[in-house]
Amino acid sequence: MKRRNTEYTFYDSFNSDDEYLEMLEAAIEASEIGYLISDAEGKVIKVNQAQINITGQVPSYNVGRNMREVEIEDQSPSATIMVCETLKPVKIEQNLVNGRSYLVYANPYFDSEGKLKYVLSNLLDTTEINKTKESLEKIKNDNIRLNMQLQQLQNKMDPQSNKIIHQSRIMRQLLLLCDKVAQFDSNVLLQGESGVGKERIAEYIFEKSNRSRKPFVKINCASIPEQLMESELFGYEAGSFTGAAGKGKKGILEYAQEGTLLLDEVSELAVPLQAKLLRFLQEGEFFRVGGTKPITTDVRIIAASNKELETLVSEGVFREDLYYRLNVIPIYVPPLRERKEDIPLLAGYFAKQFNEKHNLKKSFNIEAVNKLLEFSFRGNVRELQNTIERILVLSENDMIRETDVTNFIKGIENEILEEETLSLKEIMQKYEMRILKQYLEKYKTQENVRKILKVSQSTISRKFDLYKIKT
């Protein structure tokens, strides 16, 4: 046997060719992968014990025979013969009469002159692989079921708990970061898609901080008109503008003294207000609208945005200096599709909430939970929450099954895709009308629907009139 012309090979650790061959024989026989080796004509030279176990064929069935004969006898193609004829690797699946199956990976081995010398075939028992997959799937389902049960137990033990529901590694790392960040007063910038839970993360940081006994104030920069935002944020002096209160008014920054202020959707803040906010962040003081006396407050700022502020800076719609002031500690909140392990726990948590809210006793079976994992939930946790409520309210049975999930999610997705000619507003109105009709059918009266949806009497009446829904 020739040794390879390299400085060192695995072969060099053996004292003789006999010892090397003995090791190869032992390795082949000990392998759980089946081996079948033939010469260049397809005549079988060697099979190992695993090949015998997988195929159920005694050695004499193959060894010494040409695989062309076996091919005819079995009336099924031989990977060995395919390699002999094509001189290329082949992969095929073989099915046995006893219902078992296996994969064959056959590869050519060429001599130093490039001529085919052997065909080496590996056999993998797909029946055993499938059993292993089924076992792993069962373990996965058991884990999901156990986690849901643990969540239900936790909810019973601590019904007022404000803990963030999660089990994914990425969220554990995020919360560890938040635990560390909470101990300092540095400004934080939360970024992530709409519905991922940025506000809840801000609350978590506040709850873990040494300011937790002080005010936590939230303001949505997109929900307040630009002309009112300045007075809301900084307050105003008496008579500073038409309609101003006689004694003036404190702004949010004053109400948040020694506490934390969440500026949600900070990307929507008007440029003039960005300058005034920047001054407060730099100097720790501000002026009320119409005021001449600076007011000093100690407030920690947490900003949140579902838009890339860095991109807005490059586009000239967000001040670069303000961006860097806010972005002292950047935290990215991942979308739900990047942490699908959290979906089963969240589904159980929301199901408990809505069962209590609507006086229901419904639950998801394991197949239904697994079905939830197949959807992208582009609206993230908020969409999942709405989806769970919709399924619980509209499903007919107490046990929610896979078909229920498919019907109440896939049906809506398909309907939206089919209406590509509609505007977003029209699509939302169509969906809103359908929900109102389904709620009315289930809860019988407009007043019951109003209570369930937690809206005012004027709102529900206006909606029913808009969609011409008759009670």
Image (cartoon, grey):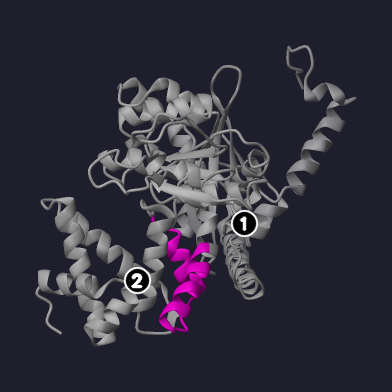
**Label 1 secondary element:** helix
Residue 77 coordinates in the image, percent (x, y) = 44, 51
Can you identify the residue that label 1 sits on?
A: 61
449 is higher (above) or lower (below) than 417: below
Residue 175 coordinates in the image, percent (x, y) = 62, 47
Question: Is 358 part of what is drawn in magenta?
Answer: yes
Q: How many marks?
A: 2
Front position in the image: 108 or 456: 456
The residues bearing labels 2 and 1 have C-alpha atoms spaced at a distance of: 62 Å
> What's the magenta region?
346-375
Label ID, residue 383: none
Asked which quadrant contains residue 176, the reply is top right
Q: Is residue 41 visible?
A: no
Front position in the image: 380 or 134: 380
Identify the residue at horizontal 77%, vertical 48% (top origin): 30
Asked which quadrant contains residue 136, the reply is bottom right
